[in-house]
Image (cartoon, rainbow, N blue to C red):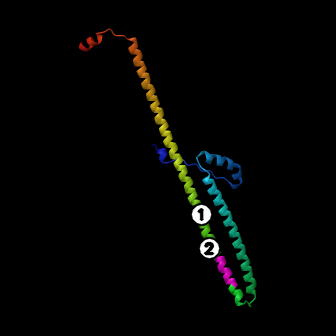
């Protein structure tokens, strides 16, 4: 293979969110034409859905943390916190900390899945590009063989046509051999 097959040309396109709806039908058609059964599209939609869910959970946790801070500030202003209020505040803090930790774990998991998704897409692109190169090489080889075969047929037809036109009298070929 040539040097181009070892360093394939990669073309990447970035699409802004406001343009996604406009090109989505064309993108689906292109993915379907490349043999994609829709798995990549489904996985991308699932990742987007998870990202949105994590964003909502993050907002909820931030609101809860703000309310807790406000409540602590209110209660901190008064020195007469009861033991049960302190216990409840400590439990809330602990739940928020656990929720934040869980959210970070989910976010890490989402990033891992997204990386796997991107790697899968890249592998598929590389495989398709390799197949294209192999197909191109095979097409060139086929064209060369077709040309060689056509030249050989022309040569045979020329030889047969010449043999039909020149009729040698019997015995002349023997004289040439002896002489």
- Left or right: 153 with respect to 175? right
User: Residue drawn 59% across and 66% down?
Assistant: 109
Q: Is residue 89 magenta?
A: yes
- Eyeballing the image, is 74 above or below 164? below
Quarter of the view holding residue 65: bottom right
First reached walking from the N terminus: tag 2 or tag 1: 2
- Left or right: 80 with respect to 170? right
User: Residue drawn 49% across and 36% down?
Assistant: 139
Q: Disc 2 versus disc 1: distance between alpha carbons?
A: 15 Å
Q: Position of residue 60 (x, y in %)?
A: 71, 71
Query: 19 or 38, which lies in front?
Result: 38
Q: Secondary structure at mark 2?
A: helix
- Left or right: 78 with respect to 109? right
Range covered by the magenta-colored residues: 88-97
User: Residue drawn 57% across and 56% down?
Assistant: 118
Quarter of the view holding residue 72: bottom right
User: Which residue in the structure is indicated by mark 1?
Assistant: 111
Quarter of the image that includes the N terminus: top left
- Left or right: 131 with respect to 174? right
User: Which residue in the structure is indicated by mark 2?
Assistant: 101
Q: Position of residue 127 (x, y in %)?
A: 52, 49
């Amino acid at each position: 293979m040539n040097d181009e097959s070892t360093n394939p040309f990669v073309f990447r396109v970035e699409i802004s969110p406001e343009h996604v709806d406009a090109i989505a039908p064309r993108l689906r058609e292109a993915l379907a034409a490349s043999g994609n059964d829709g798995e990549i599209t489904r996985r991308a939609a699932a990742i987007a859905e998870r990202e949105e869910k994590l964003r909502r959970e993050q907002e909820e946790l931030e609101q809860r943390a703000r309310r807790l801070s406000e409540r602590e500030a209110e209660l901190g202003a008064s020195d007469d916190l009861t033991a049960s209020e302190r216990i409840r505040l400590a439990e809330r803090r602990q739940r928020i900390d656990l929720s934040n930790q869980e959210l970070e774990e989910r976010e890490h998991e989402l990033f891992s899945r997204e990386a796997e998704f991107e790697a899968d897409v890249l592998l598929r692109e590389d495989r398709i590009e390799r197949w294209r190169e192999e197909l191109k090489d095979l097409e060139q080889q086929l064209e060369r063989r077709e040309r060689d075969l056509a030249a050989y047929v022309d040569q045979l037809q020329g030889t047969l046509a010449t043999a039909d036109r020149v009729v040698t009298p019997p015995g002349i070929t023997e004289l040439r051999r002896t002489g």
